[in-house]
Amino acid sequence: MDEKKTIVEPEAHQLDQSLGFLINVAARSMRIALEEGLKPFELTPTHWLIMRGLNEKADAILSDLSIMLFIDNATLTRHVDKLSQMGLIRRKRHRSDRRALLVSLTDKGKELLPELDAVANAIDRKATEGINIKRAEQGLEWLKVLHENLVRNGNS
């Protein structure tokens, strides 16, 4: 029987070798840096994520956007309300399903997004400093596989 090895053996599971801990710490550091970078725009990382998602999928149904971004409906609605008040996104009812709400970027939101992306890109560059491009790309692929494995196994 071919048993798959894990990268961390149970007896060696210390924090500095814990995959979950290290991913969590790195994600938290990235989030804090993004929070700081977005303060001048009076936006949060979640606001940027929603705007980025809407740039990739215009006229998204709110519930579909929730699934795509892994944000629960109540939280997403609260953030959509704020972005709408700021004039960065618009909401409208779906033509054939009056219960469904469509959201999209406004022209103001589309114009602001490149500035927000520049902030995120600068943080990505800082975070990956000293890592060659090939390793960085492999790291992104590795994170995607890790996520897919957990979703496939019902853990996400």
Image (cartoon, rainbow, N blue to C red):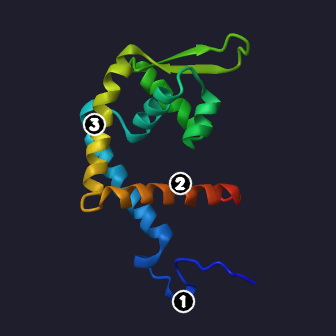
- The disc, 1 or 2, on the residue closer to the chain's N-terminal end is 1
Q: What residue do we see at 40% from left, 21% from top?
A: 88
In the rendered image, which residue does mark 1 sit on?
Answer: 11
State the SS at label 1: helix
Query: Relative to 120, does residue 4 appear above or below in the rendering?
Result: below
Describe the element under mark 2 as helix, strand or loop: helix
Q: Quadrant of residue 138?
A: bottom left
The answer for how far apart the CA atoms under marks 1 and 2 are is 27 Å
| Front-most of residues 108 and 98 | 108
The span from disc 2 to disc 3 (Cα, nearest Å) is: 23 Å
Residue at mark 2: 144
Task: Say which element carries label 3.
Answer: helix
Image height of 43 relative to 70, above or below: above
Residue at the disc numbered 3: 118
The amino acid beneath tag 2 is Lys
From the viewer's side, name the closer residue of 152 and 16: 152
Residue at point 31%, 49% (across, down): 124
